[in-house]
Structure formats: C-alpha cells, structure tokens
C-alpha cells in the first residue's frame, strides 16, 4: 500500500500528466496535490466535486443502481479525469482528479494506470 504522497508521485509518471489531486468529494477538501503548473489544482479539484455530486444526485433521481467509475471532461488541450475511489471505510468518499495534456496522453492507458494507483493507495 502506498501513502498519499507516493501515490500522487506515481500518478504524475503517467504520460501527459499535468497535475493530480486526492479529494474528499463530500466536503471538497483536498487531501493531497501534486503538479498543476499554472493551474491551481486545489481550486480545480474542489470545483469538480460539484460535478461529481451533481452526477450522483442525477443517478439517484433516475433510480439507477450503477455507481460512477470515472468521469472524463475533454477540453481543447486537456483531459480532466475524475476517478471515484471504492470506499474502504463507511462514509469514505474520495476521488482522484487528474489533468492530462491531450497531445501527450494516452487516455486508455492513463485510466488503467490511475486505476492501479487507486488500488495501491492507503489513506
């Protein structure tokens, strides 16, 4: 099992990685952040918790039993990948938020590697 710092460093080795954050999506609190360049990853991560909460509410209103694996937002030059982590404790609601350079990233491989980072992460 990897600590938050080690997991975020591992995520940043993904081709095209610009920044990554671990976030509690019920509160918007960022538990760890790495990279980002000129982008404030803490602000971006907290803002994207609203997207996650809206989608979860929509699934609930529709009565769909499915959970969210990940969400993808595509910009002109970036991919924003939001991966909801499987809760390991009651009430745990964490996500990994990653920003990728669209020109350098392989989206399928990034999703696969982020899934592996999640599996090894110990919070």
Image: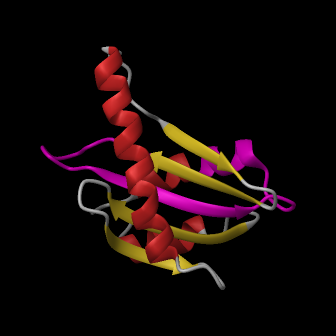
Q: Which residue appears at 37% of the width and 28% of the height? A: 58
Describe residue 85's horizontal placement relative to residue 40 as left or right.
left
Task: Pick the residue in front: 111 or 49.
Answer: 49
Displayed quadrant of residue 122: bottom left
Describe residue 30's horizontal placement relative to residue 33 as left or right.
left
* Residue 23 drawn at (x, y percent): 36, 63
Q: Which residue appears at 38% of the width and 20% of the height? A: 66
Give the residues drawn in magenta, as a range. 84-113
* Residue 42 drawn at (x, y percent): 44, 75
Task: Pick the residue in front: 83 or 64.
Answer: 64
Q: Residue furthest right?
A: 103
As drawn, 16 above or below 49: below
* Residue 123 drawn at (x, y percent): 27, 63
Image quarter hosting the N terminus: bottom left
Q: Does residue 67 appear in the picture of this structure?
A: yes
Q: Is residue 31 magenta?
A: no
As drawn, 93 above or below 100: above
Describe residue 26's horizontal placement relative to residue 59 as left or right.
left
Task: Pick the residue in front: 119 or 28.
Answer: 28
Q: How many marks?
A: 0
Displayed quadrant of residue 112: top right
Q: Which residue appears at 66% of the width and 84% of the height? A: 37
* Residue 48 drawn at (x, y percent): 46, 57
As drawn, 59 above or below 34: above
Q: Which residue appears at 33% of the width and 41% of the height? A: 86
Task: Pick the residue in front: 16 or 102.
Answer: 102
């Amino acid at each position: 099992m990897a600590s938050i710092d080690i997991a975020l460093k591992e995520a940043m080795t993904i081709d095209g990685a610009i920044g990554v954050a671990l976030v509690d999506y019920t509160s918007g609190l960022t538990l760890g952040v790495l990279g980002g360049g000129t982008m404030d990853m803490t602000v971006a991560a907290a803002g994207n918790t609203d997207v996650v909460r809206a989608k979860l509410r929509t699934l609930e209103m529709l009565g769909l039993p499915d959970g969210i694996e990940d969400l993808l937002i595509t910009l002109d030059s970036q991919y924003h990948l939001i991966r909801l982590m499987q809760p390991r404790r009651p009430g745990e609601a964490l996500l990994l938020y990653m920003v990728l350079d669209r020109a350098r990233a392989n989206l399928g491989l990034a999703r696969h590697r982020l899934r592996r980072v999640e599996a090894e992460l110990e919070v």
